[in-house]
Amino acid sequence: MKRFSKIYTALILVFLFAPIAVLIFFSFNSGSSTSSFSGFSVRWYVELFRNAEILNALKNSLILAVTSSLIATVIGTAAAFGIHHMRNKHLRRSIMSVTNVPMMNPEIITGISLMFLFVFVGSFLGLSTKLNFWTMLIAHITFNLPYVILNVLPKFKQMDKSLPEAALDLGCTPIQSFFKVQLPAILPGVLTGMIMAFTMSLDDFVISYFTSGVDFQTLPVLIYSMTKKSVKPTIYALSSIIFVLIFLLLLLSNREKSTYERLEVKRLKAEKRRKEAILRAQKAGKTIKPQKEHIPTDTPRAPKKNSSFLTKIIAVTCAIAVIISLCVMIGVYSKNTITLNVYNWGEYISDGSEGSLNVNRAFEKYCRSEFGMNVKVNYVTYTSNEDLYAKLSTDAVSYDIIIPSDYMIARLASEGLLAELNFDNIPNYESCISENFRGLYYDPENKYSVPYTYGMIGVIYNANVVSEEDTGSWDLMWNSKYSGDIVQFNNARDAFGTAFYKLGLDVNTSDVSEWRAGLEELKKQKPLLDKYVMDEIYNMMESGEAAIGAYYAGDYLTMLDNQADNVDLQFYYPENTNLFIDAMCIPASAQNKDLAEKYINFMLSEEVAIANAEYICYASPHSVVYNSEVYREDMGEDVIEILYPKDFDFHAAYDANCYKDLDAQTKKLLNSLWEELKIS
């Protein structure tokens, strides 16, 4: 039985820690694949400390976690003290039930509720930005409090009730009694509560996502935004470092707890020996002088001030966090710095990694040299057009630059959420943007947007599995010969789009019968699928787990760099396929419109436009990029042929195949059909 329990425990540990072990292992991979190990290297650790965006998000996460856990520990300890001394047990139970709500409530409900509260209060106070660092701090303190209270309250119950009374009898004030007698006794619970609050805050994504503003992005939110493309191995390196640090912190916490328990056992043994000595003396008719009795002075009854090594570490960490926060505030606000808030897709701008140009830092230098302005670009990312719309439509935050897709631009403009551009501040527009990318349906008068990138959806396949004669059309996605090796988009619009293109239907139709026909086609495909995917397609195609999938051309080029040795990924465009354009816009609520227009003009300059096009791997609508010999040489002719097909009339193909914003009734129909497909 003991052997079985050991095996069972070992299996549980393997199940829990195997993913972490794989992550740490591949953080030392010289390549960027998670399916094949190319050789040992610390490349990604070096890249990590060069990536300003990741380091800034990590700094924000640490500041928020330390500050919120410290405040929650103070408030939670005071709350536990009050709850412990309540005489009415019914009131005590009611308060404990209310206290546990943030912990028991689903995080998404807590996050949305807090967001609505902050937006309501901000609107009532007339604030232009309702969500910021302070709203995140309040939210984190709120969900940290129950963990502190639940760790501290049992220590109050375990404490000898006569200790504070004795301290008061000996002349201590209630405050002195708490800090000199009660706090040392409950200190293990306080420290455990603080550590738990710190780890919960550092790890939180859902509540942070709903309560974050434009000025503060944490690491979990940044990593989530990177799922537009595959997460880079720099995140593996960062996760490995965080895991090791948290592991060491837990070891220190357990060491502190073990020391306390050892001293408590030592004290109890000494107390037992003293009582036995008294009994023996009474039987022998002798007396024992109290001063002759030796009781260890390093027990919890007589704690030494500042004797806890862990306490010192936490104190130093808190001090460092406060100093960093002050330095950040002084650095940002003491020099009349103008903050430009940019809201973009994740992994959608050249950020300085792997030797690329850091566009945002370059713009800051440009403003100092050309205009004498001290500008700070605050770069925040999102994962979908709908996420962007949710932030703008609630008026919770204010951004200066956004880069949505075509159909979302049309929607934002129709609802008055975009500002008209002053092209006098964007002189590069006339020489850079060709007529092919002007006057399109989403901005027919070219008032609200400047194109940033564009692309098309094609079919990716593994040539080692798929026969060449089966390729060339959408039929490959429905070919039963490759059952179990096909993956489909895990979003309704793109999945139905593939079916509509296969059937030759209009992807923007409002005809219910045509949508039903698309549903039937997807139902025929479903038994052949491995699964519905989005960003998972990277690892599945690169490793050979899947052999066929539809995705964006730029992302296919990213996969080529990471494919396994036994995989030969190829790509083609079916006759009809989706085309999209992402464009730079300025929200109507922007605080720095003139500076935002300077930023757009800077993005159209030759060096910056080429750097972005090479980094993103999507096609560029900028003629200065397409005609650049440097760009064509860096990308290679094979890549150029994929991104810019020859004899391709983009304007005509775009009008016929792009997604447009559907009316409300059709959107509702699409969602219901998607649910029907998933549960069929």
Image (spheres, rainbow, N blue to C red):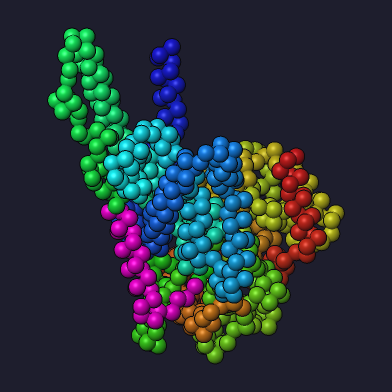
Instruction: Residue 483: give x, y in percent of width and height.
Output: 65, 38
Main secondary-structure element of the magenta-colored stretch: helix
- Magenta segment: does it hold 548? no
Q: State the image quarter where residue 16 is shown.
A: top left
Could you tell me if residue 428 is visible in this image? yes
Give the position of the N terminus as an image quadrant.
top left
Question: Relative to 522, is 260 on the left or the right?
Answer: left
Give the percent coordinates (x, y) of residue 554: 53, 61
In this view, the residue in front, 107 or 341, is 107
Q: Residue at x 47, y 64 (%)?
A: 133
In the figure, 126 relative to 80: above or below? below
Question: Which residue of the protein is positioned furthest toward the top in this rendering?
Answer: 284
Q: Is residue 504 something that shows in the picture?
A: no
Against 447, is 553 above or below? above
State the image coordinates of residue 206 (x, y, percent, origin top left): 54, 52
Q: Residue at 69% of width from left, 56% of height from top?
A: 493
Horizontally, residue 231 falls left or right of residue 329, namely right
Check if residue 321 falls in the magenta segment: yes
Percent position of residue 588, x then y: 61, 78
Q: Residue at x 45, y 70 (%)?
A: 378
Residue 543 versus residue 198: which sits nearer the camera?
198
* Residue at 14% in and 25% down: 292
Residue ranking furthest to the left: 292
- Vertically, is 616 above or below 250? below
Which residues lie in the magenta part?
316-341
